[in-house]
C-alpha cells in the first residue's frame, strides 16, 4: 500500500458570488521603493493605489452585500426620527438585549462618549487587552488602562482555545479597590491586540460575578462579537447546538452595556454605537452625543449607513459566512505552516499575527523588528500589513520592549479570494527565506499619542 500523500491545504469555498469588481494592480519594485521612501517607511502613509493586497485592517474595509446596497437606497435622511434609525435600534436591541442604543460614527466615537462620562483621574479601567484607541480614550480622561488577559495570551505558541480570557483572580484583586477606583470593567471580543483570540462564556460569567460582587459595571467591546460567538460555538462545551445570535445574547446578558465599531462585524464601511441598560447613563450619553456626533437618531452618520449596518449585523451572524471567514484565516495559516513560519496560535478570528520575535530573533526592540517586517512585506509584494508591537504600544523609553511584538495580516471581510491569500502566503515565505538579511529601522519623527499612524522611519544602513 502506498502511504497517502500529505493533504494540500484546501481553500474554503465562498458562500457568495461576485457582482461588482474593483481593479487592483501590483506596482513595480521601483514604484514600491519610491512609495516607501515618500511614506517615511510608515505603511499608514502609503497611497492605497500603491498597495496590491491590503491587509492593514479588517475595519471599514468589508464588501457590502446586494441587500445592504439596497438598504442604502432606502435611506430616510430625516434629521430626526428616521425610520432607518428605528431599524438599527431594533436590530441592536434584539441582538444585544440592551434597551438604550446611542449611534456613533465609529468605535472610537462610542469610546469617547462612554469614557468621557465614566473615566476620571485616580481610577483604573481594566480590559483583557485595550485596543489602541480604547486605551487612548481611557487615558485621555485621566484613568489608567490595565490589561488583564490570562498568561497564555502572552505565550504565542500556546494552543489555549480562549486566549482572550480575563485573568479573573487578578481582576478580583483589582476590584478590591471598589467602584470609586474602578468605574467599569471592559472585555474585548475578540481580543484584537492579542491575536484576534476569543473569550469564553464561562470566563465572561466569572468576570460578571466578580464585577457584581464589587458593584462595578461590565461593558463589552463587541466589535467582533459574531466571530467570538463562532469560536464559542466550536470550542466551548454545550454550545455547538446554538445559533450565533443566541451565543451573542449569552454574552450580552452578562454585561451592562457595550461599545461597537460596526466597521468590523457590522460589515459596513462606517458606523458604531454605545448600548446600555442604564437609563441615567443613556440620557447623559445622548447629551454628549448631540455635542460631538449629532442628534440621537443619526449619531454622526447618514441614515442610509444605519440601514446598511442593521442588515450587516444580521449577515455577520450567518454560519456559512462565518465558517468561510474563519476558514480563510485558517487557510492562510495552513499555507504558512508549510514553511513553518511562526505566528500566534491558534489562528484568530480576523487575521494572522506573525510572531516577530521568532521571525527576526536577532533584531533588538530598538530596531523596531515588527515595523521592519511590515516594510519588507510591502517591499516584497506590495502587501500592506500593520505592526502591533514596539511602535504601536511601546511608547516608554526608546528600545523598551512591548509586551507583544506582532505583525498583523488582517483579512477584510468578503473582499479577497483564496488565490489572493495564496499570493500573500508566498510573499511572506519569500521574506522568511531572506530574513537573515533584514537590518531594522530607526524612528526619526513621532507624535505624542498613537504614534504608529504618523511616525517616520529610516532603514538602518
Ligand atoms: N475596539 C477594537 C477592539 C478595535 O479593534 C477597534 C478598531 C476599535 C475599538 C475602534 O473602532 O476604528 O471604528 O474607531 N480597530 C481597527 C483595527 C482600527 O485595525 O483593528 P473604530
Image (cartoon, grey):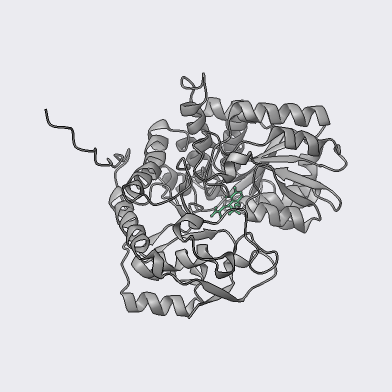
Residue sitting at x 86%, y 51%: 122
Residue sitting at x 42%, y 76%: 35
In the rendered image of this protein, does residue 325 appear above or below residue 427?
A: above
In the rendered image of this protein, does residue 25 appear above or below residue 261?
A: below
Relative image position of residue 292 (x, y in whole percent) = 72, 57
Relative image position of residue 92 (x, y in whole percent) = 60, 36
Marks counted in the figure total 0
- Image quadrant where residue 375 sits: bottom left
Would residue 212 appear left or right of 414 to someone viewing this image?
right
Would residue 348 appear left or right of 123 to someone viewing this image?
left
In the rendered image of this protein, does residue 331 appear above or below residue 251?
A: below
Residue toward you, 24 or 140:
140
- The outermost residue toward the front is 362
Relative image position of residue 165 (x, y in whole percent) = 61, 36
Would residue 95 appear left or right of 276 to someone viewing this image?
left
Relative image position of residue 64 (x, y in whole percent) = 42, 48
Q: Quadrant of the N terminus?
A: top left
Residue 294 seen in this snapshot:
no
In the rendered image of this protein, does residue 89 appear above or below residue 459?
A: above
Amino acid at each position: 500500500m502506498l502511504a497517502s500523500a500529505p493533504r494540500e491545504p484546501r481553500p474554503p469555498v465562498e458562500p457568495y458570488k461576485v457582482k461588482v469588481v474593483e481593479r487592483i494592480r501590483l506596482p513595480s519594485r521601483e514604484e514600491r521603493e519610491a512609495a516607501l521612501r515618500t511614506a517615511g517607511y510608515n505603511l499608514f502613509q502609503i497611497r492605497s493605489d500603491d498597495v496590491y493586497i491590503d491587509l492593514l485592517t479588517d475595519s471599514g474595509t468589508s464588501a457590502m452585500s446586494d441587500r445592504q446596497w439596497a438598504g442604502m437606497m432606502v435611506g430616510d435622511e430625516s434629521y430626526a426620527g428616521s425610520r432607518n434609525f428605528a431599524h438599527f435600534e431594533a436590530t441592536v436591541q434584539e441582538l444585544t438585549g440592551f434597551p438604550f442604543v446611542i449611534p456613533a460614527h465609529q468605535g472610537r466615537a462610542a469610546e469617547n462618549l462612554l469614557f468621557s462620562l465614566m473615566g476620571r483621574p485616580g481610577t483604573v479601567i481594566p480590559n483583557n487587552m485595550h485596543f489602541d484607541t480604547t486605551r487612548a480614550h481611557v487615558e485621555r480622561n485621566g484613568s489608567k488602562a490595565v490589561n488583564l488577559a490570562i498568561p497564555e495570551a502572552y505565550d504565542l505558541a500556546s494552543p489555549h482555545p480562549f486566549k482572550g480570557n480575563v485573568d479573573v483572580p487578578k481582576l478580583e484583586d483589582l476590584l478590591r479597590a471598589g467602584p470609586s477606583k474602578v468605574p467599569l470593567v471592559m472585555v474585548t471580543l475578540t481580543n484584537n491586540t492579542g491575536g484576534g483570540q476569543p473569550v469564553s462564556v464561562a470566563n465572561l460569567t466569572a468576570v460578571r460575578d466578580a464585577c457584581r460582587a464589587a458593584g462595578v459595571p461590565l461593558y463589552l467591546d463587541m466589535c467582533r462579537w459574531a466571530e467570538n460567538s463562532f469560536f464559542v460555538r466550536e470550542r466551548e462545551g454545550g454550545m455547538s447546538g446554538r445559533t450565533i445570535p443566541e451565543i451573542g445574547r449569552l454574552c450580552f446578558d452578562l454585561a451592562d452595556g457595550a461599545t461597537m465599531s460596526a466597521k468590523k462585524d457590522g460589515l459596513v464601511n462606517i458606523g458604531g454605537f454605545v448600548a446600555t441598560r442604564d437609563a441615567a447613563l443613556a440620557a447623559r450619553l445622548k447629551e454628549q452625543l448631540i455635542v460631538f456626533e449629532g442628534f440621537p437618531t443619526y449619531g454622526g452618520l447618514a441614515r442610509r449607513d444605519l440601514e446598511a449596518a442593521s442588515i450587516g449585523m444580521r449577515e455577520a451572524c450567518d454560519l456559512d459566512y462565518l465558517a468561510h471567514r474563519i476558514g480563510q484565516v485558517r487557510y492562510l495559516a495552513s499555507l504558512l505552516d508549510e514553511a513553518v513560519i511562526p505566528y500566534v496560535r491558534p489562528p484568530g478570528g480576523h487575521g494572522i499575527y506573525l510572531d516577530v520575535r521568532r521571525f527576526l530573533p536577532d533584531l533588538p526592540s530598538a530596531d523596531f523588528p515588527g515595523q521592519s517586517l511590515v516594510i519588507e512585506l510591502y517591499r516584497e509584494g506590495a502587501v500592506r500589513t500593520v505592526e502591533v508591537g514596539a511602535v504601536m504600544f511601546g511608547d516608554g523609553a526608546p528600545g523598551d520592549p512591548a509586551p507583544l511584538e506582532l505583525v498583523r495580516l488582517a483579512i477584510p471581510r468578503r473582499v479577497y479570494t483564496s488565490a489572493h491569500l495564496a499570493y500573500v502566503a508566498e510573499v511572506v515565505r519569500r521574506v522568511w527565506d531572506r530574513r537573515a538579511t533584514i537590518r531594522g529601522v530607526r524612528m526619526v519623527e513621532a507624535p505624542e499619542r498613537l504614534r504608529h499612524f504618523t511616525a517616520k522611519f529610516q532603514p538602518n544602513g
